[in-house]
Amino acid sequence: MTQDSILPLDIITIEQSDSDSILKTRAEAISFPLTHENRLLITAMRNKLFQLGGVGLAAPQVKQNKQIIAIYISEDAAKLRVHASAYPMHIMINPSYEPVAETVIISDFEGCYSVASKSGKVPRHQAINLTYQDEDGQLYLKTVSGFYARVLQHEIDHLNGILITDRLTPDCVQGSTEAMMALRYRELSAAQKLLFDQLAAKKRATREDATTDSQA
């Protein structure tokens, strides 16, 4: 695969009939050393996540059936969550997790770039035991908790063909993306609402600039 065949990356959604197979299939493990193709993909995923302004991205979401995720929790994103910390952009390869013994289950708002029609309060383990490799193949074993653990569970689920629609049981708060966004907004503090509005305006401007560039 050449660089041109990987870039740019487009998000696929479960609502697209031709995307169901890759989004609902377990991704393939990555071997080391990384191939040139996989290094290009990782670079493209970093760029895509920065462009989206999101906190996580899994390779199947960009139609690559590979066990690679990108994570980036900015200072602003952390401020919109309770007791969340910022994390710089980083890549995890072949990641997996197990819940910490006796950890509690907490439900909180989640959306998904690959699920356009629904979001809601997804139940997740508060703490997990995490295993993954970095881009050099170094193996890591960590215990993480809070919002970071939530993001990791979401992205690792993607590698196992699991979406938020599979986690949202009938008793979960859920609905259209627009309705859940409005509900989440109402639950923010005044300071968080101001920040939320600023970030939303920034994202709109970014999308408008991208559209202008594509039409130039």
Image (cartoon, rainbow, N blue to C red):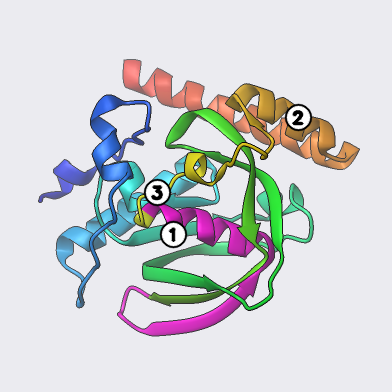
Mark 2 Cα-neighbour bin, 10 Å: few <14, some 14–19, many ≥20? some
Is 162 part of what is drawn in magenta?
Answer: no
Above/below status of 168 relative to 149: above
- Which image quarter holds the C terminus? top left
* Numbered badge on residue 24: none
Assign a secondary structure to mark 1: helix
For residue 112, say whether it is visible: yes
Q: Tell me which residue sits at (31%, 58%) in the image.
A: 42
Give the labeled residue for mark 3: 47
Q: For this rendering, which residue is in front, 41 or 159?
A: 159
Tell me the amino acid under the disc marked 3: Asn
Q: Are marks 3 and 2 in contact (CB under 8 Å)?
A: no
Tell me the amino acid under the disc marked 1: Ile
Q: CA distance from mark 1 to mark 3?
A: 19 Å
State the image quarter where residue 91 is shown: bottom left
Mark 3 Cα-neighbour bin, 10 Å: few <14, some 14–19, many ≥20? some
Bounds of the magenta span?
134-158
Assign a secondary structure to mark 3: helix
- Furthest residue toward front: 170
Q: Tell me which residue sits at (36%, 36%) in the image.
A: 11
Q: In this rendering, would 134 be left or right of 85? A: left
Give the labeled residue for mark 1: 156
Q: In this rendering, would 27 be left or right of 81? A: left
Tell me the amino acid under the disc marked 2: Leu
Is 140 part of what is drawn in magenta?
Answer: yes
The percent position of residue 215, horizontal first and vertical second, equals: 33, 15
State the image quarter where residue 70 is shown: bottom left
Marks 3 and 2, the one that precedes in the sequence: 3
* Numbered badge on residue 183: 2
- Of circles 3 and 2, the one toward us is 2
Q: For this rendering, which residue is in front, 165 or 188?
A: 165
